[in-house]
Protein backbone atom coordinates (compact mmCIF):
# COMPACT_ATOMS: atom_id res chain seq x y z
CA UNK A 1 0.00 0.00 0.00
CA UNK A 2 1.65 3.23 -1.20
CA UNK A 3 0.82 6.44 0.68
CA UNK A 4 2.22 9.68 -0.66
CA UNK A 5 1.25 13.11 0.73
CA UNK A 6 -1.51 11.52 2.82
CA UNK A 7 -3.15 9.92 -0.22
CA UNK A 8 -3.38 6.15 -0.65
CA UNK A 9 -2.59 5.35 -4.26
CA UNK A 10 -4.80 2.68 -5.92
CA UNK A 11 -2.72 -0.55 -6.06
CA UNK A 12 -4.09 -1.89 -9.37
CA UNK A 13 -3.31 1.23 -11.43
CA UNK A 14 -0.09 2.08 -13.24
CA UNK A 15 2.09 4.46 -11.21
CA UNK A 16 1.79 7.11 -13.94
CA UNK A 17 -1.99 7.23 -13.37
CA UNK A 18 -1.80 6.52 -9.63
CA UNK A 19 0.17 9.70 -8.96
CA UNK A 20 -2.59 11.77 -10.54
CA UNK A 21 -4.81 10.94 -7.53
CA UNK A 22 -2.73 13.52 -5.64
CA UNK A 23 -4.23 17.02 -5.97
CA UNK A 24 -1.83 19.16 -8.00
CA UNK A 25 -0.23 16.34 -9.99
CA UNK A 26 -1.47 15.61 -13.49
CA UNK A 27 -0.23 13.29 -16.23
CA UNK A 28 2.68 15.48 -17.36
CA UNK A 29 3.99 16.18 -13.83
CA UNK A 30 3.58 12.49 -13.03
CA UNK A 31 5.76 11.58 -16.03
CA UNK A 32 8.41 14.16 -15.05
CA UNK A 33 8.56 12.81 -11.49
CA UNK A 34 8.91 9.20 -12.67
CA UNK A 35 11.56 10.17 -15.20
CA UNK A 36 13.57 11.94 -12.48
CA UNK A 37 13.18 8.94 -10.14
CA UNK A 38 14.12 6.56 -12.99
CA UNK A 39 11.00 4.40 -12.49
CA UNK A 40 9.09 2.71 -15.33
CA UNK A 41 5.76 4.50 -15.77
CA UNK A 42 4.01 1.24 -16.72
CA UNK A 43 4.80 -0.41 -13.37
CA UNK A 44 1.80 -1.06 -11.12
CA UNK A 45 1.59 0.78 -7.79
CA UNK A 46 1.53 -2.52 -5.85
CA UNK A 47 4.77 -3.63 -7.56
CA UNK A 48 6.76 -0.63 -6.27
CA UNK A 49 9.41 -1.22 -3.62
CA UNK A 50 9.67 0.94 -0.48
CA UNK A 51 12.84 2.50 -1.90
CA UNK A 52 11.04 3.58 -5.09
CA UNK A 53 8.10 5.01 -3.10
CA UNK A 54 10.52 6.99 -0.92
CA UNK A 55 12.30 8.31 -4.02
CA UNK A 56 8.98 9.54 -5.46
CA UNK A 57 7.97 11.04 -2.09
CA UNK A 58 11.26 12.98 -1.81
CA UNK A 59 10.98 14.38 -5.34
CA UNK A 60 7.39 15.52 -4.72
CA UNK A 61 8.24 17.14 -1.36
CA UNK A 62 11.28 18.87 -2.82
CA UNK A 63 9.73 20.17 -6.03
CA UNK A 64 5.94 20.28 -6.02
CA UNK A 65 3.28 22.20 -4.12
CA UNK A 66 0.43 19.75 -3.57
CA UNK A 67 -2.75 19.01 -1.61
CA UNK A 68 -3.45 21.42 1.28
CA UNK A 69 -0.73 23.97 0.47
CA UNK A 70 -1.88 24.24 -3.14
CA UNK A 71 -5.58 24.48 -2.20
CA UNK A 72 -4.76 27.22 0.33
CA UNK A 73 -2.72 29.17 -2.24
CA UNK A 74 -5.50 28.99 -4.83
CA UNK A 75 -8.17 30.11 -2.36
CA UNK A 76 -6.02 33.03 -1.15
CA UNK A 77 -5.43 34.08 -4.77
CA UNK A 78 -9.20 34.12 -5.39
CA UNK A 79 -9.80 36.06 -2.14
CA UNK A 80 -7.17 38.59 -3.23
CA UNK A 81 -8.92 39.09 -6.58
CA UNK A 82 -12.24 39.63 -4.79
CA UNK A 83 -10.69 42.09 -2.29
CA UNK A 84 -9.08 44.29 -4.95
CA UNK A 85 -12.36 44.35 -6.86
CA UNK A 86 -10.98 43.47 -10.27
CA UNK A 87 -13.17 42.04 -13.03
CA UNK A 88 -12.18 38.44 -12.32
CA UNK A 89 -12.81 39.00 -8.62
CA UNK A 90 -16.28 40.35 -9.29
CA UNK A 91 -17.08 37.33 -11.49
CA UNK A 92 -15.97 35.01 -8.66
CA UNK A 93 -18.07 36.97 -6.17
CA UNK A 94 -21.20 36.73 -8.36
CA UNK A 95 -20.56 33.05 -9.09
CA UNK A 96 -20.38 33.61 -12.83
CA UNK A 97 -17.88 32.19 -15.35
CA UNK A 98 -14.51 33.94 -14.95
CA UNK A 99 -12.70 33.22 -18.18
CA UNK A 100 -14.80 34.94 -20.84
CA UNK A 101 -17.40 32.25 -21.50
CA UNK A 102 -20.86 33.25 -22.67
CA UNK A 103 -23.69 33.34 -20.13
CA UNK A 104 -26.78 33.98 -22.22
CA UNK A 105 -26.97 30.26 -22.82
CA UNK A 106 -24.89 27.55 -21.16
CA UNK A 107 -22.97 28.31 -17.91
CA UNK A 108 -25.55 26.25 -15.99
CA UNK A 109 -22.90 24.59 -13.82
CA UNK A 110 -21.74 27.93 -12.51
CA UNK A 111 -25.14 29.72 -12.42
CA UNK A 112 -27.24 26.87 -11.02
CA UNK A 113 -30.59 25.56 -12.29
CA UNK A 114 -32.90 27.67 -14.48
CA UNK A 115 -35.28 29.96 -12.63
CA UNK A 116 -38.35 28.20 -14.00
CA UNK A 117 -37.08 24.87 -12.66
CA UNK A 118 -37.78 26.06 -9.11
CA UNK A 119 -41.53 25.71 -8.49
CA UNK A 120 -43.32 28.34 -6.46
CA UNK A 121 -45.39 27.28 -3.47
CA UNK A 122 -49.07 28.33 -3.45
CA UNK A 123 -50.33 29.76 -0.16
Image (cartoon, helix red, strand yellow):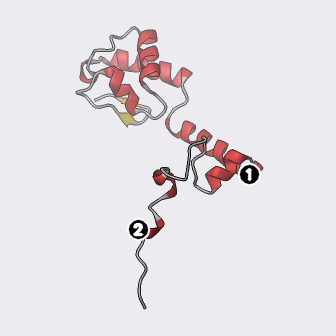
**For residue 11, which numbered disc appears in the image?**
none
Mark toward the viewer: 1 or 2: 2
Q: Residue at x 47, y 59 (%)?
A: 112
In the rendered view of the protein, which quadrant contains the N terminus?
Answer: top left
In this orientation, does residue 48 appear?
yes
Q: Residue at x 74, y 51 (%)?
A: 83
Depicted 12 relative to depicted 47: above or below: below
**Which x, y percent locates residue 25?**
46, 28
Which residue occupies the foreground of this view, 14 or 4?
A: 14
Q: Earlier in the sequence, mark 1 or mark 2?
A: 1
In this orientation, does residue 81 appear?
no
Q: Which residue sits furthest front?
A: 104
In the rendered view of the protein, which quadrant contains the C terminus?
Answer: bottom left
User: From the viewer's perspective, is 78 left or right of 54?
Assistant: right
**Which x, y percent locates residue 5?**
44, 32
Q: Residue at x 66, y 42 (%)?
A: 77
For residue 116, which quarter of the picture? bottom left
Count the numbered circles shown: 2
**Which x, y percent locates residue 31?**
42, 16
Q: Residue at x 32, y 28 (%)?
A: 2
Q: Secondary structure at mark 2?
A: helix
Assess whether mark 2 and mark 1 are in contact (beta carbons under 8 angstroms). Answer: no
Depicted 7 relative to depicted 110: above or below: above
Q: Which residue is mark 2?
A: 117
Which residue occupies the foreground of this view, 102 or 74?
A: 102
Q: Which residue is mark 1?
A: 83
Q: Secondary structure at mark 1?
A: helix
Gap between marks 1 and 2 measured at Cα: 33 Å
Which residue occupies the foreground of this view, 59 or 89?
A: 89
Amino acid sequence: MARIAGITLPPEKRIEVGLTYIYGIGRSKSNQILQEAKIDKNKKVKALSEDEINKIRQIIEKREKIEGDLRKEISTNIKRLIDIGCFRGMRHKRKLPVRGQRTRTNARTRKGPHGHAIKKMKA
